[in-house]
Amino acid sequence: MPFPAKFVWGAAASAYQIEGAAREDGRGPSIWDDWCRIPGNVWSDQSGDVACDHYHRMEDDVRLMKELGLRAYRFSIAWPRVMPEGRGVVNDQGLDFYSRLVDALLGAGITPYATLFHWDLPSTLHRRGGWLNRSICDWFADYTAVVMDCLSDRVSHWMTLNEPQVFIKFGYGDGVNAPGFKLPLSEQLLGVHHALLAHGKSVLAVRARARQAAKVGWAPVCVVKYPATSSAADVAAARTATLGSSQRDLWNNSWYNDPVFLGEYPAHLLSLYGADVPAFDGADMSVIRQPLDFLGLNIYEGQPVRASGNAQGWENAPRPIGHPLTAFRWPVEPESLYWGPCFMHERYNLPIYITENGLSSMDWPSMDGRVHDPQRIDFTRRYLLSLRRASEDGVDIAGYLHWSLMDNFEWAAGYRERFGLVYVDYATQQRTPKDSCAWYRRVIESNGAHLDTDPFGQAFPGTPAS
């Protein structure tokens, strides 16, 4: 059966990963520009200086989106392109690029979904302490206001932060992403608290400056633990594992979402983190807990768990030998797109968008000139069938935004990984829609009713046609 009538189908990308034009038209440097210039930080010492050259090819890329049949496009706005120093002076050329992008999307019948921060922190703000400086909450709010004044007459769907777990944990804790710090847990938690405050102040700025009714959410990672079996005990264990944590690190859900939606840090993590928790008060929580319209979830994988007699009540369950992996060596776990939304909807009771989901695959042009990516079709079909099941079981699933529109700069992995529906030849910047484009277009046109057909409309063996 199809998805709900108003279901939103789209794809996603982010500024640093596709735009290029890193030193053009007044754009200031970001921490990723700085990070990529240090040898050894990124695979093959690559950078986003040119990336997919989307800055110069935006109109053609929007035409591709229209041909793909997208109904929505999630993009991020580069803070250093809009405000080169992160605060103060506004770069009109930068704002004009996003204004033209929005106009092109609307002209193509595609709804823009704008993300305000997708990791490209202005370098000047980093030198002032970045996410460790409480002032960043106001800097981010001021930047939000500038963007709203320019775009909110045409953009109605907004996300504040993308994956705070990643840009704090990997950037300030593990040191594998920009800015490359390996700080103690107390400072990582301080960075998270400031990110949450920045989110809250950004929402306030959206509400105050919006020139039309605005729908606001955010897009954290959803760390999914799913039941190894259908037993009630394993389901309960998976729920506990997804909503809790037994590790003294930042890789969890509730430390981020509970303050945003419930106005408090979870008690079990306050106890676990102990003296490393930064000082905060009720006023902070009042800022963080702003009414939101939806929850975005970025889901790629999951971990099977089972009930256990240990203190936490669950344990990781082993995967079978030979369990499928993507080219990035991430496990293929379609169940994650059922159980993640289920558990998050139970706890926070808001409409859910899957704001990222996809895979890196081993794609290259075949001798016939086409890019055949059957693994992407199979992966996406499996995950969407799980998401459709969640919708049928009562979870309010509002939309699905595939990651990603096109191959792009995959952070520390450079251009090694290809997540796109569209193949990019980085030497020529030629775009080649992959087979998955034709298949996804049929899925969109049928509102999910054709999940059981291949790119050419033939039923997959062993499955009924929709």
Image (cartoon, rainbow, N blue to C red):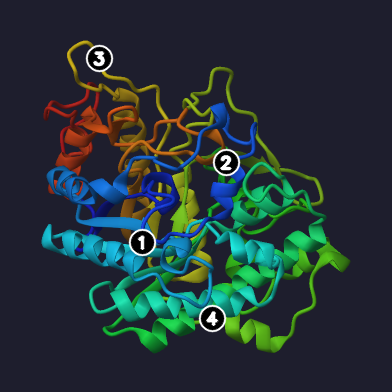
Neighbourhood count class around disc 1 (C-alpha, 10 Å): few under 14, some 14–19, many 20 upward: few
Disc 3/disc 2 C-alpha distance (Å): 31 Å
The spot of residue 291 in percent (x, y) is 47, 81
Query: Do residues under tags 4 and 3 come within 8 Å of each other at their CB atoms?
Result: no
The residue positioned 59% from the left and 84% from the top of the image is 287
Question: Mark 4 belongs to which amino acid?
Answer: Lys
Question: Mark 1 belongs to which amino acid?
Answer: Gly
What SS does tag 3 mark? loop
Disc 1/disc 3 C-alpha distance (Å): 42 Å
Identify residue for label 2.
36
Q: Is residue 392 visible?
A: no
Q: Which numbered disc, 1 or 4, marks the residue closer to the eye?
A: 4
Question: Mark 2 belongs to which amino acid?
Answer: Cys
Of mark 3 and mark 2, the one earlier in the sequence is 2
The spot of residue 102 in percent (x, y) is 23, 64
10 or 63: nearer the viewer: 63
Q: Which mark is residue 201?
A: 4
Question: Mark 3 belongs to which amino acid?
Answer: Ser
317 or 213: nearer the viewer: 213
The spot of residue 319 in percent (x, y) is 59, 27
Q: Which mark is residue 394?
A: 1
